[in-house]
């Protein structure tokens, strides 16, 4: 479900991209050191964004170090470490465990249950530190599971369940900034859920799985696409407005790159993929018709 809140690399300056990668690599290292290899595999762009955002807002004491990693062993890479990165790692573990268990309930894939078991001790240890976040996660993932089982079609309600728990994960400290952070998380959560549904709609149709857009017919290049695009745009407008109310100076341009451009990269890729598939089907149909005429 996650991994949609990423940068538009082509629009970043080299210095900004290096800073962004240092957060991604720093979060990766933090997960490995504190939770193990399984947790490290749950690394995603959304929690990297959270680490970046909270660092920019609270400006915690930060260390920059360079280390080698398993995936890129030939050279050292800059890695950012601070309390905001550690908090993002904690939230990554909480979220990943709950998501793995939810997938296990839905799909009964042994691999999901096995991965959850490997994360369980870390989850339990971390959950005790964050009762508010855990309560929001457990309650809304349960409601989301029930909504999907009931095949509810209320886009605002169903996507809002992801928004509700992500809103609480975005609130690191309950202070004067918490409501704007909660608003950001809420609308980003809704955006993530709908983007995930868009990406999986064809697969879910074939398998008969629940999907908010499964009964919408063709989406790309049709009026339905414009309707969905307007909904997604509205969500990003609200999230961006909340961000602009926060006194973030450090890394602000990277965050704006993500909010105003990066989040749409996956959308554009999905649209392009559909166009390519349509062209391939057209060429195949043309080839079949040409063969029939020759006969």
Image (tube, helix red, strand yellow):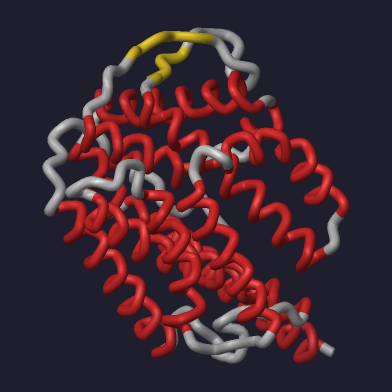
Q: Is residue 179 left or right of residue 39?
A: left
User: Going 58% across and 15% down the picture, which residue do you hit?
Assistant: 69
- On the rendered image, what quadrant is the N terminus found in? bottom right
Front in this rendered view, residue 274 or 96: 96
Can you see residue 133?
yes
User: Going 19% across and 39% down the picture, which residue do you hit?
Assistant: 253
User: Going 44% across and 34% down the picture, which residue do you hit?
Assistant: 87
- Point out residue 261 in the picture as x, y percentages from the top left corner: 28, 53
Can you see residue 287?
no
Residue 282 sits above or below residue 107 on the image: below
- Point out residue 237 in the picture as x, y percentages from the top left corner: 22, 66
- Point out residue 154 in the picture as x, y percentages from the top left corner: 49, 88
- Point out residue 291 in the picture as x, y percentages from the top left corner: 78, 83
Residue 60 sits above or below residue 194 on the image: above
Q: Quadrant of residue 93?
A: top right
Q: Is residue 27 left or right of residue 290?
A: left
Residue 211 sits above or below residue 25 on the image: below
User: Going 62% across and 31% down the picture, which residue do you hit?
Assistant: 40
Q: Quadrant of residue 10?
A: top left
- On the rendered image, what quadrant is the C terminus found in? bottom right
Front in this rendered view, residue 230 or 58: 58
Q: Is residue 122 left or right of residue 232?
A: right
Q: Which residue is outermost to the right?
A: 110
Q: Is residue 28 left or right of residue 104?
A: left
């Amino acid at each position: 479900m996650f991994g949609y809140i990423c940068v538009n690399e082509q629009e970043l300056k080299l210095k900004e991209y290096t800073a962004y990668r240092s957060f991604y690599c720093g979060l990766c290292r933090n997960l490995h050191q504190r939770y193990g290899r399984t947790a490290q595999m749950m690394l995603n762009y959304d929690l990297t964004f959270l680490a970046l955002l909270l660092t920019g807002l609270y400006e915690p004491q930060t260390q920059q170090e360079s280390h080698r990693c398993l995936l890129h062993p030939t050279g050292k890479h800059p890695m950012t470490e601070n309390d905001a990165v550690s908090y993002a790692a904690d939230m990554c573990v909480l979220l990943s465990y709950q998501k793995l268990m939810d997938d296990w309930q839905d799909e009964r894939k042994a691999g999901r249950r096995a991965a959850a078991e490997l994360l369980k001790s870390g989850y339990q240890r971390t959950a005790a530190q964050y009762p508010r976040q855990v309560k929001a996660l457990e309650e809304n993932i349960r409601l989301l599971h029930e909504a999907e089982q009931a095949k509810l079609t209320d886009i605002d309600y169903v996507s809002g369940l992801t928004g509700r728990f992500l809103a609480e994960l975005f609130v690191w400290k309950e202070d004067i900034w918490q409501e704007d952070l909660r608003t950001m998380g809420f609308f980003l959560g809704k955006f993530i859920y709908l983007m995930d549904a868009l990406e999986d709609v064809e697969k879910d149709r074939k398998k008969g799985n629940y999907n908010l857009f499964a009964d919408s017919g063709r989406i790309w290049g049709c009026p339905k696409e414009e309707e969905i695009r307007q909904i997604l745009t509205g969500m990003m407008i609200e999230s961006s407005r909340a961000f602009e109310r926060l006194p973030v100076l450090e890394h602000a341009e990277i965050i704006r790159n993500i909010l105003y451009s990066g989040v749409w990269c996956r959308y554009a890729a999905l649209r392009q993929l559909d166009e390519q598939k349509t062209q391939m089907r057209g060429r195949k149909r043309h080839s079949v018709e040409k063969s029939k005429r020759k006969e």
